[in-house]
Amino acid sequence: MIKIVRVDHRLLHGQVIFSWIKQYDINHIIIGDNMIQNDPIASIALKMAKPEDVKMDIVKISDVQNVVSKNSKDKIMILVKGPEQAKELINIIPEIKEINYGGIAKKANSKQYGQAVFLTPEELKQTKDIINHNVKVFIQQVPSSPVEKANFND
């Protein structure tokens, strides 16, 4: 069962490991990314960062649904790097109805929408597309912090 889908450019890090995994009692992390499996150093770093008692799969976004289906009894957290990947994911897994935006890095031409969420015009369009698919997008760094208000309509 998918417990949470999170967009975070850092993927697996302290906030995820110590806050979100505990909050949702996650026992399986799926990292959906079309590049990491081709990057052995990034893959090793992610595997080293995960808690010992949590399973982890690093797969292409197109393969996430297959991993979810094969592990349907697990409490799953799906991590992707950005709105583009989140949009691809909701097209593959239409039962996703909520996505947490945790961290999207500041870059050229980006605008701040939350404490750690910066969107380029293209990422804003992708976010609007996600919302138009009846998926709630909420910005929250950790479960104990309040959900940040964001206006994605500008």
Image (cartoon, helix red, strand yellow):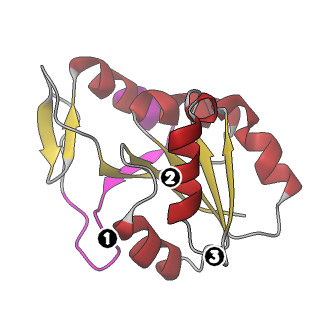
Of 42 and 35, which appears nearest the observer? 42
Evaluate whether residue 78 shows in this view. Answer: no
Q: Residue 47 falls in which quadrant of the image?
A: bottom right
Query: Label 1 vs label 2: CA separation?
Result: 22 Å
Three-letter amino acid code of the residue under disc 1: Val
On screen, residue 130 versus residue 124, left or right, reads right
Q: Quadrant of the N terminus?
A: bottom right
Evaluate whether residue 17 shows in this view. Answer: yes
Q: Looking at the image, tell me whether mark 2 or mark 3 is earlier in sequence order.
A: 2
Three-letter amino acid code of the residue under disc 2: Ala
How far across and how far down the image is residue 150, in percent? Answer: 19, 47
In the depicted structure, whether residue 148 falls above or below residue 128? below
Q: Looking at the image, tell me whether mark 3 or mark 1 is earlier in sequence order.
A: 3
What is the crowding at mark 2: few (fewer than 14 residues within 10 Å), some, or many (at least 20)? few
Q: Looking at the image, tell me whether mark 1 or mark 2 is earlier in sequence order.
A: 2
Query: Label 2 vs label 3: CA separation?
Result: 14 Å
Marks 3/1 in contact by CB < 8 Å: the verdict is no
Q: Is residue 134 magenta?
A: yes
Mark 1: secondary structure: loop
Q: Which residue sits at x=28%, y=27%?
A: 124
Of 90 and 50, which appears nearest the observer? 50
For residue 52, the mark is 3
Foreground tag (3 vs 1)? 3
Mark 3: secondary structure: loop
Three-letter amino acid code of the residue under disc 3: Glu
For residue 45, the mark is 2
Mark 2: secondary structure: helix
Q: Which residue sits at x=83%, y=60%?
A: 71
In the image, which residues are magenta? 128-148
Residue that badge 1 annotates: 142
Q: Residue 108 falls in which quadrant of the image?
A: top left
